Image: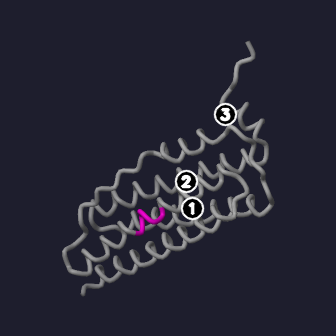
């Protein structure tokens, strides 16, 4: 196995573990959430982390078999599925416990770390498909972070968040 191939596999192992850890964290946070929005949003994030894990596993297996970096059919939706979960569940005000706010803060830090890692992997990539994959993945992680920032703001002040984001008219 070449040195470059070994570095790629090691990078994939790290990414794979980050996605596994992310899924576990989001699953626990979803179960502990004190409101329906949090449960659904965090469960959806767990699902997306698991999807990433499956892709990394497939890529890892391909490279390990010396088939090279495969073409990956990964096209994030720009966060629209997560934003749909968020917007459909705003009917009731969230109950924001300190533990939920702490979980969102931790999640944002995880997303930032993952984003930074994927950006670094993109710069180190030797294959165009690998660079493109990490670029798309980093963009999705950034979208997760932005959505979590919205959720945090919503938890702190649901009415204020609604006025700021939805711009209701006072006709």
Q: Which type of secondary structure does the marked residue at label 3 adopt? A: helix
Q: CA distance from mark 1 to mark 2?
A: 7 Å
Residue 84 vs residue 18, the one in the foreground = 84
Image quarter of the N terminus: bottom left
Q: Which type of secondary structure does the marked residue at label 1 adopt? A: helix
Of all residues, the one furthest to the bottom in this rendering is 1
Q: Which mark is residue 144?
A: 2
Does residue 127 appear left or right of residue 152 in this picture?
Answer: left
Q: Which residue is mark 3?
A: 165
The image shows residue 96 at horizontal and vertical percentages of: 78, 53
How many other residues sit within 10 Å of disc 1, few (<14), some (14-19) or many (≥20)? many
Label pair 1/2, CB-CB below 8 angstroms: yes
Q: Residue at x 75, y 17 (%)?
A: 170
Residue 127 vs residue 142, the one in the foreground = 142
Indicate which disc, 1 or 3, sits on the residue closer to the N terminus.
Answer: 1
Q: Determine whether 3 is above or below 67 in the image.
A: below
Indicate which disc, 1 or 2, sits on the residue closer to the N terminus.
Answer: 1
The image shows residue 130 at horizontal and vertical percentages of: 31, 64
Q: Determine whether 109 is above or below 20 in the image.
A: above
Q: Residue at x 60, y 39 (%)?
A: 87
Of all residues, the one furthest to the left in this rendering is 67
The image shows residue 38 at horizontal and vertical percentages of: 65, 53
Q: Which residue is mark 1?
A: 111
Magenta range is: 49-53
Q: Is residue 50 magenta?
A: yes
Image quarter of the C terminus: top right
Q: Residue at x 34, y 79 (%)?
A: 9
Q: Which type of secondary structure does the marked residue at label 2 adopt? A: helix
Does residue 63 appear left or right of residue 145 in this picture?
Answer: left
Q: Is residue 14 magenta?
A: no
């Amino acid at each position: 196995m070449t040195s470059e191939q070994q570095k790629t596999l090691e990078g994939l192992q790290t990414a794979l573990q980050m996605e596994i850890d992310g899924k576990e964290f989001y699953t626990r946070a979803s179960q502990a959430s004190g409101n329906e929005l949090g449960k659904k949003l965090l469960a959806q994030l767990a699902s997306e982390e698991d999807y990433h894990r499956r892709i990394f596993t497939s890529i890892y297996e391909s490279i390990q078999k010396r088939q090279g970096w495969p073409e990956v059919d990964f096209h994030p939706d720009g966060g629209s599925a997560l934003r749909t979960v968020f917007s459909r569940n705003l009917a009731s005000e969230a109950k924001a416990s300190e533990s939920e706010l702490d979980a969102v803060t931790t999640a944002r830090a995880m997303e930032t770390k993952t984003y930074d890692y994927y950006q670094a992997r993109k710069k180190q990539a030797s294959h165009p498909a690998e660079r493109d994959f990490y670029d798309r993945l980093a963009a999705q992680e950034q979208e997760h972070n932005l959505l979590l920032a919205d959720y945090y703001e919503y938890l702190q002040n649901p009415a204020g968040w609604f006025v700021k984001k939805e711009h209701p008219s006072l006709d």
